[in-house]
Image (cartoon, rainbow, N blue to C red):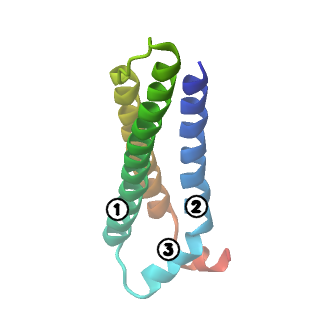
Amino acid sequence: MISAILFIFGSISLMNMFLVDFQSRNCEFGLFEVVGTTKNQLNKMLDREIGIYLGGSLAISLICGSILSVIVCRQLDMMNHCITLKLPWIFLLALAAVLAVIYLTFSVYARSELKKTSILSAIRDD
């Protein structure tokens, strides 16, 4: 139950981080356009950033979670002799699916917001 709650709140927190970061960078996007960056280049830049954030969070959670699980299960096994480590494949697939949904959702959102924003309004907002 605790892992499900952390899973949900972690997903919400990650999505909130992306939205706040994007909203606060409007001036930066306007300045990029002023120096000649195209909307396509901005979209590719955002896609790479999102991919790095999500790929990094997936890798860190899998590596750290696996190491911590092995340590805790070994300690419990030494005390009780009844603990075996089984990876929760359904939970891991759900994690990957949620990260993919966040990636796709935020990519679509960023593309639509970049289309709406004009250079002058982005620079003036700051």
Up-down: is 47 above or below 35? Answer: above
Q: Residue furthest bottom?
A: 35
Q: Earlier in the sequence, mark 2 or mark 3?
A: 2
Up-down: is 125 above or below 87? Answer: below
Nearest the camera: 114 or 98? 98
Q: Amino acid at mark 3?
A: Phe
Nearest the camera: 59 or 28? 59
Compared across the picture, whether 41 is left or right of 25 comes to left
Q: Badge 2 is on which residue?
A: 21
Nearest the camera: 43 or 86? 86
What is the quadrant of residue 63 in the picture? top left
Which residue is depicted at the point 58% across and 76% down? Answer: 27
Nearest the camera: 55 or 118? 55
Crowding at label 3, few (<14), some or many (≥20) Cα neighbours within 10 Å? many
Q: Badge 1 is on which residue?
A: 48
What is the quadrant of residue 69 in the picture? top left
Mark 2–mark 3 Cα distance, whole angstroms, equals 12 Å
Q: Residue furthest front?
A: 78
Crowding at label 2, few (<14), some or many (≥20) Cα neighbours within 10 Å? few
Compared across the picture, whether 122 is left or right of 92 comes to right
Circles 1 and 2, Cβ within 8 Å, touching? The answer is: no
Which residue is depicted at the point 61% across and 26% down? Answer: 5
Q: Badge 3 is on which residue?
A: 29
Circles 1 and 3, Cβ within 8 Å, touching? The answer is: no
Q: Position of residue 112 (x, y in %)?
A: 45, 54
Q: Position of residue 123 (x, y in %)?
A: 60, 79
Which residue is depicted at the point 44% across and 42% down? Answer: 61
